[in-house]
Image (tube, helix red, strand yellow):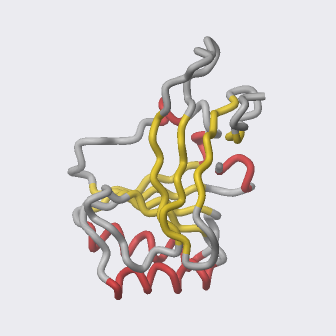
Amino acid sequence: MVATSGGYGFWAREKHQPEAITPQSLDMFFDVSTLVVAQSQSQTETLAVAEEALRDGVCPIVVMQLTAPLTLTEGRRLQLAAQAGGTTGLCLIDEDKPNNTAETRWHCAPLPDPDNYPEDSTLQRWTLIKNKSGTLGVWDVRWDQSARRLIVVSASRE
């Protein structure tokens, strides 16, 4: 993610959330020294920090771990900031807290691995359930550890 984009990644979250990211858990995906983590007191602060990071454009990706649904105004502000900075914004939101302003909405779920790959058990189904500018779809993907990227798995698994 960050390694292939040629810049830093930015992760904004409220510090009181029980789930926390750790560099050790992300090291297999990209060089964690390129990740900046900002912890805030509230979602309002998280959104303000994320908006500035999106607008600045230094980080090609800004991830926001949110605890409440976005209002239309908040979502639109994030969209405008991302467009101004040429940055990708990714909001991690629980399924029961939808975002009506999102350009796309994805559902990601683990899949049982019928082939039981011993080197990797990261088979997932990614479903595009909202897309304001295109069609919807479903993809099965697997993390390729050696290439450090996602591989789309064909239906026949070839």
Say above or below: 32 vs 87. Answer: above
Question: Residue visible at 27% across and 64% down?
Answer: 97
Residue 45: x and y in percent read 30, 71
Q: Is residue 151 left or right of residue 68?
A: right
Q: Residue 152: where, in percent of width, then height?
A: 70, 41
In the rendered view, would you say 118 is above or below 109?
above
Please tell me in which quadrant of the rendered image residue 86 appears: bottom right
Quarter holding the C terminus is top right
Of 126 and 87, the residue lying toward us: 126
Residue 48 vs residue 1, the one in the foreground? 1
Residue 36 vertical position relative to residue 114 in the rendered view, above or below: below
Which is more toward the observer, 91 or 99?
99
Residue reaching furthest to the front:
156
Q: Is residue 35 left or right of residue 16?
A: right
**To which quarter of the image does residue 13 belong?**
bottom left
One can see residue 149 in this view = no
Residue 20 falls in image quadrant: top left
Q: Residue furthest top?
A: 118
**Residue pictured at 52% horizontal, 86% vertical:** 80
Task: Give x and y (percent) for residue 6.
Answer: 74, 55
Give the residue at x 62% y 56%.
8
Query: How many marks are shown on the rendered structure?
Result: 0
Q: Is residue 76 visible?
A: yes
Give me the residue at 52% from left, 69% from top: 104
